[in-house]
Amino acid sequence: KAGVTQTPRYLIKTRGQQVTLSCSPISGHRSVSWYQQTPGQGLQFLFEYFSETQRNKGNFPGRFSGRQFSNSRSEMNVSTLELGDSALYLCASSSGSVGIRGYTFGSGTRLTVV
Amino acid sequence: AQTVTQSQPEMSVQEAETVTLSCTYDTSESDYYLFWYKQPPSRQMILVIRQEAYKQQNATENRFSVNFQKAAKSFSLKISDSQLGDAAMYFCAYRSADSGNTPLVFGKGTRLSVIA
């Protein structure tokens, strides 16, 4: 069974640009969550999608957005990149609507903004 | 809002010895789930063990076990017979059991080193 796949693995962007990250969940998983991981702030929740609907959103500016497709694949977009957006972005999927069995994470996308 | 605290930024253990990582959390809820995740240098977060708050019995997965003290809001992870491959960041996480689909809340993590 394939795991959670995130692409690309690494990304370097310039301030002011926009970026799109992709996440393919485990087959059959309908819930996809996104987290930002930085050394200073740790893991912070961005948003969660279930069956193409955003169910929850973290405390991030509107420059951060996402969506989920009918095949459960998800994308997140960051517009007008800032240096502080440099981070590891992790995607996680779960089978149930409440994720009580835990989440399966991908290996993340390392975004560097210069 | 729920918070998770890991008071040990770094820990080390000799190979084959036992180490305990601490985690406390703050919540007013009675039904929730607790998790320990491992993040090796490969960056992928791996679920180590999970505990359901309404179960009094402590969860165990091979060399990994937890000490869940609900009244004290404590959820420590014990690693027995430590191996070099256990070296990683360990994160404690909390999730409400409500149907409002609240997200995982993570602690800041503990970096575990294993000394050969």
Image: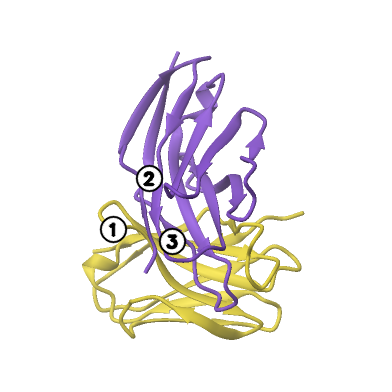
Chain colours: A yellow, B purple
Specify whether B19 is left or right of A92.
left
* Residue beneath disc 3: B105
In the picture, the disc for residue A41 is 1
Q: Secondary structure at mark 2?
A: loop
Visible residue check, residue A84: yes
Measured in 3D between alpha carbons, the distance from the residue under mark 1 to the one under mark 3, in whole angstroms, is 12 Å
Q: Secondary structure at mark 3?
A: strand
Q: Position of residue A39 (x, y in %)?
A: 29, 51
Q: Quadrant of the N terminus of chain A?
A: bottom right
Measured in 3D between alpha carbons, the distance from the residue under mark 2 to the one under mark 1, in whole angstroms, is 11 Å
* Residue beneath disc 2: B109
In front: B16, or B95?
A: B95
Q: Nearer the viewer, mark 1 or mark 3?
A: 3
Image point (65%, 42%), residue name: B57
Residue A24 sits in which quadrant?
Answer: bottom right
On what subunit does the disc labeled 1 rest?
A: A
Q: Residues within 10 Å of mark 3 (few under 14, many from 20)?
A: many
Q: Residues within 10 Å of mark 2 (few under 14, many from 20)?
A: many
